[in-house]
Image (cartoon, rainbow, N blue to C red):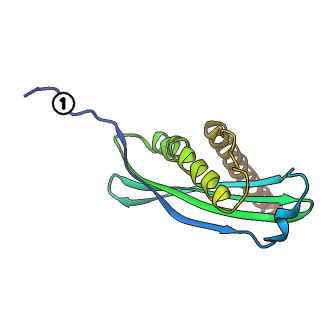
Amino acid sequence: MSDEPAPKNHFSIQKIYVKDVSFESPATPKVFSFQKWEPKIDLNLSNRHTKVASDMYEAVLSITATVSQEDQTAFLIEVQQAGLFAVSGFNDQESSYLLGSQCMNILFPYAREVISDLTVRGGFPPVILSPVNFDALYQQHLKSQNEKQASETQDESSESEQVKH
């Protein structure tokens, strides 16, 4: 046996799973008659996480892909790719980064595979999503929150000024 103390920080994947999935192709079979397949893809990403036990979190990456051809929706896919992650020994800022960025980096390839598979099963060429920089998205989110807090603080001080006059 070793006398080494257990590592203080712990981050691990406990389970990866599809939480929800939907495929709709409202214009079939007409949509298959296009002479040339040049789809427009509208992609919407979001994520969330919830604490499910003392050091256990569920992280969910939601992706909605709407694929249109000649201003007509060819198909719509909604995927919620989820995972259970053990996170302990980190401060709030580090935990937030792990859950908001790193968990999404882990979940994204699974969601991309689900989307590609569903597209093919729906009779269309596969949609292969480009990589996403979740670190950059997380930083944008932090910046947006900081600006919002600064704006709210400024508004409160303006209201205080008005009350004094």
Residue lying farthest bottom? 26
Q: Give whichever of 119, 111 is nearer the camera.
A: 119
**Height in image: 133 above or below 157?**
above
**Height in image: 19 above or below 86?**
below
Number of numbered labels in the structure image? 1
Q: Give whichever of 156, 86 is nearer the camera.
A: 86
Q: Residue at x 68, y 45 (%)?
A: 128
Q: Secondary structure at mark 1?
A: loop
Q: Residues within 10 Å of mark 1 (few under 14, many from 20)?
A: few
Residue 86 horizontal side relative to residue 116, left or right: left
Residue 127 horizontal side relative to residue 79, left or right: right
Q: Residue at x 70, y 60 (%)?
A: 123
Residue under numbered circle 1: 5
Residue kind at label 1, given as amino acid type: Pro
**Height in image: 90 above or below 73?**
above
Residue 109 horizontal side relative to residue 39, left or right: left
Q: Position of residue 96 (x, y in %)?
A: 50, 46
Q: Give whichever of 54, 128 is nearer the camera.
A: 128
Q: Quadrant of the N terminus?
A: top left
Q: Position of residue 141 (x, y in %)?
A: 66, 46
Q: In terms of image quadrants, where is residue 120?
A: bottom right
Residue lying farthest left? 1
Residue 6 visible somewhere in the drawing: yes
Q: Residue at x 73, y 46 (%)?
A: 147
Residue 100 visible somewhere in the drawing: no
Q: Position of residue 8 (x, y in %)?
A: 29, 35
**Height in image: 5 above or below 33?**
above
Q: Give whichever of 152, 43 is nearer the camera.
A: 43
Residue 8 horizontal side relative to residue 142, left or right: left
Q: Quadrant of the C terminus?
A: bottom right
Q: Position of residue 80 (x, y in %)?
A: 56, 60
